[in-house]
Image (cartoon, helix red, strand yellow):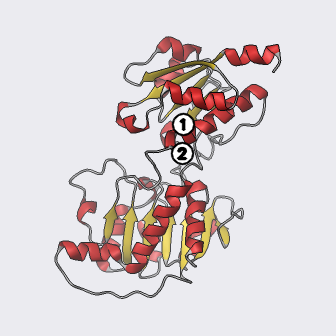
Amino acid sequence: MSEREAKVKAQVKVYVENYNRDRQYSISHEQVERCLAAVGVTGEITPAWHEEPDLKALADAQFLVAPRFNPSLIAQHGKALKLAHCINAGVERCMPLDWLPHDAVLTNSSGIHAAKAAEYGLMALLMLNTRMPRFATDQGGQRWQPVYSTPMAGKRVVIVGTGGVGSAVAKAARGAALHVTGVSRSGVPVDGFHAVATSHELDNVLAQADFVVLACPLTNQTHGLMSRARLKSLKPGCGIVNLARGGVIDYVATADLLASGHLSGCIADVFDPEPLPWNSFLWTTPGFCVTPHISCDSPAGYVEAGLAIFANNVQRFLQGRELLNVVDARHQY
């Protein structure tokens, strides 16, 4: 390492913003220090809580890492920032990016959820094929009403979103002998899918689906994507899994179509708002299974995996190399 490189690295300043409501995934000084050390970077690390910010440290920081951000605070005090990293994958709450300095970038932790997403997605598809949401409803009403299903092999699943979560579910579904079609903005082929269609072809591929898995980011283009009309256009008996965001689907229409029997079941892990209010109709909708946003997160290793991407990008920034997982403000992911 040259003397100049050592001097630059010694001057690295990192600000960490934690939130009380995300305490399970709070980021410690030691965790950041270890991840930076793994890529040969040292510097000054200042963890703080959202409720008690260290404004001087934020003003001096080149790098910021957090599970979520305070845009107004950063816009006012984070003028030296070059890179902000979200420890999560979803960044819809960060939009628009006008709170960042004009020469700064936002990166996210897309890709760290694959293992859990694959397990949850496969579990949900197996449950839908077996009609488990229906049986859970029947159990609550002490009703013995057998419904028989054919094996899952050869049935068709459409996965909307071919990023880290979508591709992980695709590989698991393909391993279970399902035919897997992905849908993305570009339609570029992705490993794990038999085929990938563009978003303009969505209605054509949905018409063939036995199951639909939503795994796309929430953007202006995907908000309300699964509208009442689109849900009604699905073939009778289709089942739905939502791993995206609550705003991607019309849950009122979903409940109505479950009641009519047009949809066979829905397993949802995401809602708007969250937590799901105690008086929401979704808690008691027959054939609707609620899980409390647990599909992709793990209490072990989640923060470290996100910090590994952050540390890699700090190193890349210092070396003048291309950054990973840069969020595109135009596409909002």
Asked if the residue at tag 1 contacts the one at tag 2, i.e. Cβ–Cβ closer than 8 Å, the answer is: yes
In this rendering, would 287 be left or right of 35? left
Is label 2 in a helix, a strand or a loop? Answer: loop
Q: Answer few, some or many: residues within 10 Å of disc 2's Cα (few below 14, many 20 plus, some between 14 and 19).
A: many
Q: Residue at x 58, y 47 (%)?
A: 110
Q: Residue furthest left?
A: 142
- Label annotation for residue 20: none
Q: Answer few, some or many: residues within 10 Å of disc 1's Cα (few below 14, many 20 plus, some between 14 and 19).
A: many
In this rendering, would 4 be left or right of 53? right
In this rendering, would 43 be left or right of 292? right
Of 47 and 80, the residue lying toward us: 47
Across and down, in percent, residue 162 comes to 61, 60
Query: Is residue 312 visible in this depiction of the protein?
Result: yes
Of 86 and 246, the residue lying toward us: 86
Q: Amino acid at mark 1?
A: Cys
Report how far apart the C-alphas of labels 2 and 1 lie in the structure: 7 Å
Q: Quadrant of residue 251?
A: bottom left
Across and down, in percent, residue 226 comes to 46, 64
Of 91 and 130, the residue lying toward us: 130
Mark 2 sits on what residue? 89
Query: Is residue 203 visible in this depiction of the protein?
Result: no
Q: Residue at x 78, y 29 (%)?
A: 320
Q: Residue at x 48, y 36 (%)?
A: 67
Is label 1 in a helix, a strand or a loop? Answer: strand
Image quadrant holding the N terminus, namely top right
Q: Residue at x 68, y 26 (%)?
A: 103
- Label annotation for residue 86: 1
Across and down, in percent, residue 101 comes to 62, 24
Q: Is residue 97 above or below residue 266?
A: above
Q: Is residue 9 above or below residue 158?
A: above
